[in-house]
Amino acid sequence: MKRLFAVLCFLLLSPLALAQARSLPDFADLAEKQGPAVVNISTTQVQRGGQMMPFPFDENDPAFEFFKRFIPRGPGGGVPRDFENKSLGSGFIVSGDGYILTNAHVVDGADEVTVRLTDKREFKAKIVGADKRTDVALLKIDANGLPAVRLGDPASLRVGEWVVAIGSPFGFDNSVTAGIVSAKGRSLPQENYVPFIQTDVAINPGNSGGPLFNLRGEVVGINSQIYSRSGGYMGVSFAIPIDVAMEIQNQLRASGKVSRGRLGVVIQEVSKELAESLGMAKPMGAVVNAVEEGGPAQKGGVEPGDVILKLDGKPINASADLPRVVGATKPGTRSVVQVWRKGTVRDLTVVVGEMQDDKQATARPQRSGKAPEQAANRIGLVVSELSAEQKRELKMNAGLVIESVRGTAARADLKAGDILIALISKGATTELKTVDQFNKLLGQFEKGSNVTLLVRRGEMQTFVTIKNINGN
């Protein structure tokens, strides 16, 4: 009876087991076909004279006097010693004549790059070019007839779709890991030019630069980095979309460098409170904090306080979208910038400039002298008017300097020394000139409402919203 029961259970459960087995993907064919196009990349960087090793002979040794004339010694009597830093990464062949894509950080600072294929052949690689902003590098080896990957369309990826990574984690060549697409279009800090693909594929040191495949065996991304508090894989990985990487590759192959468009604006995200202050129905776009003097945007009529909604018809849903769209625009292009200004939508024509090396603003306005102690205003700010000397130094016609921050304002990102330029309410922008004017404007707000201020800090401008202000 027990045996019969077991047979019946097997017959009943086996279709379910078979159905579950059919629903799970089989990565074996993909790994077999695409693996040969994935390469191991090892780099060597020589650090010269970085440390000292002891002189090989003691002063009492008879050979000391003879060899000290031929072996140079550094401070402390040691001998300068060169060290080699070695690192590992991955890459993949994009054309049969030896062009290989990888991450820029894999080959950064390398004196020598070696590419090893799955058939154990090794080649010295030339770095054709590297772009740190997108973390993409193009290598070239002297070989032909190589197996190359097929490229897919990252735009067609769906969240939840299976993806596969092949690479060399910890130097273990052609290791295969799999997972799903967790999210698309991710923005990461200091990474403004890449809409990353987020996955839960296991990525570890050595996987960097390797391909991310869809189940059709097409490369949809380059595995670039992980989010980790331990230094190892924690279930969150990021890949550079292959269309972004190939655009970089085309420029590197043509000229060895990457040219990007530039508007010359400082932007920030449009929050719900800021959208209300600007009279927008919902938060979207990138609000312009400041416009570079003489830059492309200023010449095209873009003003501080404008919200950029589209560039050449491409929607700017969030501020992180703008650097990507502008960066992908060829310098010299006449582009139509759609902006929200004072309750209306306008189209402006801007000739896109070319991005140069990053510049760091270091100046910060400092108030000379100290004003007498004052009572804080309705939002908890003690402010004073700019002196004639400060106006000359800051090249400003008006503005109020913050002496101290208290009360409601203490919850906002405001600091003593910040300059208040304007107050924004219901789409209208009012330049701040005097303390009395500022306090009267604040008196018009109902208790519990929000106040948005345009603030200058150093060479930067930003919008700050103070929420739920108190009554009089």
Image (cartoon, rainbow, N blue to C red):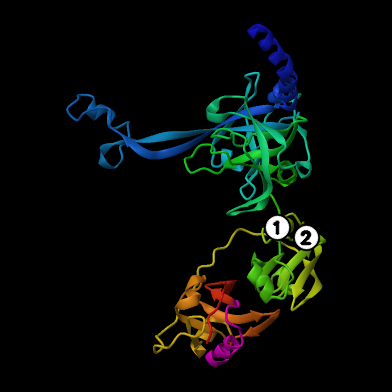
Q: Secondary structure at mark 2?
A: strand
Q: Which residue is at the far bottom?
A: 436
Residue 229: horizontal and vertical position, in percent?
48, 44
> Residue 199 lies in magenta, yes or no?
no
- Residue 417 in view, yes or no: no
Identify the residue position indicated by label 2 in the image.
Answer: 315
Identify the residue position indicated by label 1 in the image.
Answer: 321
Of 161 and 45, nearer the camera is 161
Magenta segment boundaries in residue numbering: 434-453
**N-terminal of the two: label 2 or label 1?**
2
Residue 463: horizontal and vertical position, in percent?
60, 72
For this view, does 431 lie left or right of residue 332? Answer: left
For this view, does 460 lie left or right of residue 80? Answer: right
At x 62%, y 45%, the residue is 135
Of 42 and 463, nearer the camera is 463
Q: Are marks 2 and 1 in contact (CB under 8 Å)?
A: yes
Q: Which residue is at the far left?
A: 60
Residue 416: horizontal and vertical position, in percent?
45, 77
Of 348 and 300, nearer the camera is 348
Q: CA distance from mark 2 to mark 1?
A: 8 Å
